[in-house]
Image: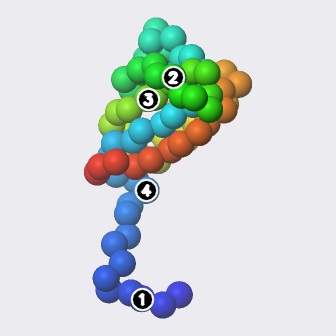
Amino acid sequence: MVNNPSRVLLPFDCPATYQISVQGRVDPNWADCLEGMSISQTRSEAVEQITVLEGNLRDQAALAGVLNTLYELHLTILLVKRIAS
């Protein structure tokens, strides 16, 4: 591996804010099971309904837990975006 001093390494074990979009509807009552992420609904021309989850997660293990819960709910994940640390 070549060291690149201008490349920023993002730690996997630190808090960060994420935005996750899924196809379908997630009931706001699921927020506690999704690490307290805020849940909002939107519509798209391409997809009938999209749910956007946004919130601060303690680390990538918490992110994996949220993604696993969405998988178990049989929701198609459209986007996972790290928006801040």
Q: Is residue 81 visible?
A: yes
Residue plotted at (53% across, 87% down):
1
For residue 47, what is the image quadrant?
Answer: top right
Residue for badge 4:
12
For badge 4, the amino acid type reads: Phe
Marks 1/2: CA–CA distance: 43 Å
- Tell me the mark number nearer the camera, choosing from 1 and 3: 3
In percent of width and height, residue 54 lies at 38, 32
The correct choice, above or below, for 83 with respect to 56 in the image is below
- Along the horizontal axis of the image, is 8 left or right of 20? left
Residue for badge 3:
53
Residues under numbered marks 1 and 2 in contact, where contact means CB atoms less than 8 Å apart: no
| Label 3 crowd (10 A; few <14 / some 14-19 / many >=20) | many
In percent of width and height, residue 8 lies at 34, 72
- Tell me the mark number nearer the camera, choosing from 4 and 2: 2
Return the mark for residue 3: 1
Marks 4/1: CA–CA distance: 19 Å
For badge 2, the amino acid type reads: Arg
The correct choice, above or below, for 79 with respect to 42 in the image is below
Marks 2/3: CA–CA distance: 14 Å
- Tell me the mark number nearer the camera, choosing from 2 and 3: 2
For badge 1, the amino acid type reads: Asn
Task: Give the mark nearest the N terminus, 1 or 2.
Answer: 1
SS label for mark 3? strand
